[in-house]
């Protein structure tokens, strides 16, 4: 049985993995119980949907207990990526435009996703193997009546 947060993560995963621009890029969701990762496609790039993290509790919601939830999506580009690999900035803009103001399915009990207004993107370049761009999204629960 899936929780509301699992359902939200799964919805985002389904949305991204069906984008035609991402067919040659490994798209997967971070899992709690496994350490497996999808194979890295020839492009040398990965898109990873993190486990949604609650930012605030909701004392009035009839559905999920959390009023606001953060979702982080990582674009990881390995240094030995194919010369034909897509630009990580292109991927960031693509995913941002596809998910910003996108309504999660009602079954997840969460609503419209939006880029974090204070820190929409972060760049991490702290090792010689890869560069990561993190896209930070927030959503709020939808009251169930």
Image: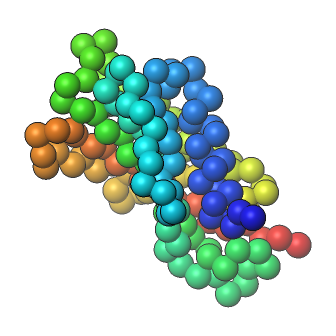
Q: Is residue 104 above or below residue 139?
A: above
Front residue of 91 and 4 = 4
Q: How is the image coloured?
A: rainbow
In the rendered image, which quarter contains the N terminus? bottom right
Q: Nearer the viewer, residue 79 or 134?
A: 79
In the image, taking residue 128 as reference, residue 58 lies left or right, namely right
**What residue occupies the far top of the structure in this picture?**
84
On-image quarter of the C terminus: bottom right
Residue at point 25% right, 23% down?
81
Q: How many labels sit on residues?
A: 0
Q: Is residue 99 left or right of residue 131?
A: right
Q: Residue at x 58, y 43 (%)?
A: 13
Rendering coords of residue 49 (x, y %): 48, 49
In the figure, residue 128 lies in which quadrant? top left
Q: Is residue 130 left or right of residue 1?
A: left
The answer to which quarter of the image holds residue 78 is top left
The picture places residue 104, in percent across and down from the top left corner, at: 68, 50
User: What residue appears at the point 59 percent right and 82 percent down from the top-left corner?
Assistant: 57
Q: Nearer the viewer, residue 10 or 136?
A: 10
Q: Is residue 40 left or right of residue 60?
A: left
- Residue projecting furthest to the right: 145
Find residue 91 and report its horizontal and vertical position in percent.
40, 30
Percent across and percent down for residue 141 are 67, 67
Residue 96 can be seen, yes or no: no
Query: At 67% across and 87% down in the image, what residue appears?
Result: 59
Quarter-of-image position of residue 85: top left
């Amino acid at each position: 049985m899936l929780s509301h947060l699992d359902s939200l993560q799964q919805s985002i995963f389904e949305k991204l993995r069906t984008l035609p621009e991402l067919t040659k890029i490994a798209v997967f969701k971070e899992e709690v119980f496994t350490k497996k990762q999808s194979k890295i496609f020839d492009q040398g790039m990965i898109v990873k949907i993190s486990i949604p993290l609650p930012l605030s509790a909701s004392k009035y919601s009839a559905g999920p207990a959390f009023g606001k939830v953060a979702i982080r999506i990582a674009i990881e580009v390995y240094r030995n990526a194919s010369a034909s690999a897509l630009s990580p900035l292109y991927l960031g803009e693509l995913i941002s435009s596809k998910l910003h103001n996108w309504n999660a399915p009602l079954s997840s009990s969460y609503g419209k996703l939006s880029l974090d207004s204070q820190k929409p993107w972060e760049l991490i370049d702290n090792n010689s193997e890869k560069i990561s761009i993190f896209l930070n999204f927030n959503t709020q629960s939808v009251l169930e009546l």
